[in-house]
Amino acid sequence: MLSTAVKLARSPSIKFLGKEGWAARRSAPIAAAVSAPSVAASALTTAAAPPPPPPAAPTPINIVPETVTTVPPSLYSDTPASNMRKVISRRLTESKSTVPHFYTSIEIPLDNILSLRKVLQKNFETKVSVNDFIIKASAMALRDVPELNATYDSKTQSQRTFESVDISVAVATPTGLITPIVPSTHEMTLTAISAKVKDLATRARDNKLKPEEYQGGTFCISNLGMFGISEFSAVINPPQGAILAVGGGERKIVPGKVNVESGEKEKPGIQTIMTARLSADRRVVDEATAGLFMGALKEYLNQPKLMML
């Protein structure tokens, strides 16, 4: 005889009712889970209960931020922001919070420019600064890559490209930074750019610029090389699509070039290297276009005689 465990194991876990079984199940009465009187009584009790009172409105609390400082008031002074500082604060805060910045950097040798400056000063008694060369080279690069010579209108969400290259040059004044414009920079000579920048910078520090001389522009350059800064990132000045941040030249050891065909290697040398960083609006240009502009800028600065044509 089989044991009880074996019988249970052999018996199917699912029992099929069949046709007769289903008829018996359908004819069987269904037991009520809750009696009718109890349900009615519960409904009456719920209907008689008064609605809960509405929650009280929260009392507004005015929280004033407290300035915590351990420095005694006799050791510092508070100066109200000037109107220019307020405008700078508002515009640059708006720029960093709404304009999608991206950055591209490149190292550019300056030795050929420094040599040409000496030749111009010795043979022609013409003085032009490195910044004048950078402005001229940027104008030529913008002429070659016009996609960067553009602005962006956030209201209409449209990009506007200009034929004329009007470069804004950042000038530090006692009341703040201002960017006077050098109009039609691509058509000007180095000496004309030098004279124009000197005139604009002088009148900017004296607060004698006209509104049309610093409002507008299609591209901006900020140079901190004269302050000993090697490189930095500038904030885009809307609606312009890009700004070029220029650092000072530094003497660096660079490896010698290698001739691929012969395998000969040149000796390492020392060059004056400048780092330029472009801050661009991703809504106006993409990374590839910014790379084309930076490559053109390096080519003009590395061969400054091209700017003389």
Image (spheres, grey):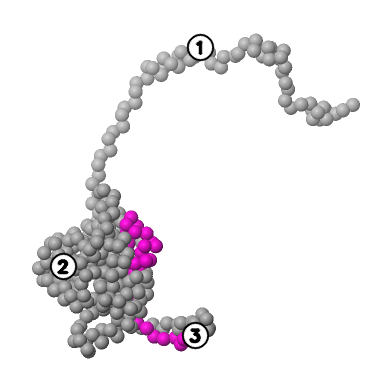
Extent of the magenta region: 265-294
Q: Please indicate whether residue 62 sits to the left or right of residue 284 in the image.
A: left
Q: Earlier in the sequence, mark 1 or mark 2?
A: 1
Q: Is residue 254 above or below residue 150?
A: below
Report the front residue among 71 and 131: 131
Q: Callout 3, which amino acid?
A: Lys
Return the disc, 2 or 3, that comes first in the chain's sequence: 2
Asked whether, in this view, residue 256 is left or right of residue 273, the answer is: right
> What number is the disc on residue 36?
1
Instruction: Name the residue nearer the viewer: 165 or 154.
Output: 165
Query: Cα distance, mark 1 to mark 3?
Result: 103 Å
Q: Nearer the viewer, residue 247 or 13?
A: 247
Q: Which mark is residue 265?
A: 3
Which residue is located at x 34 percent, y 67 percent?
Answer: 293
Task: Report how far apart the C-alphas of labels 1 and 2 lie in the structure.
Answer: 86 Å
Q: Is residue 155 left or right of residue 106?
A: left
State the SS at label 2: loop
Q: Is residue 114 magenta?
A: no
Q: Residues within 10 Å of mark 2 (few under 14, many from 20)?
A: few
Mark 2, mark 3: which one is toward the viewer? 3
Mark 2 sits on what residue?
175
Q: Amino acid at mark 1?
A: Ala
Q: Are marks 1 and 3 in contact (CB under 8 Å)?
A: no
Report which quarter residue 60 is drawn in: top left
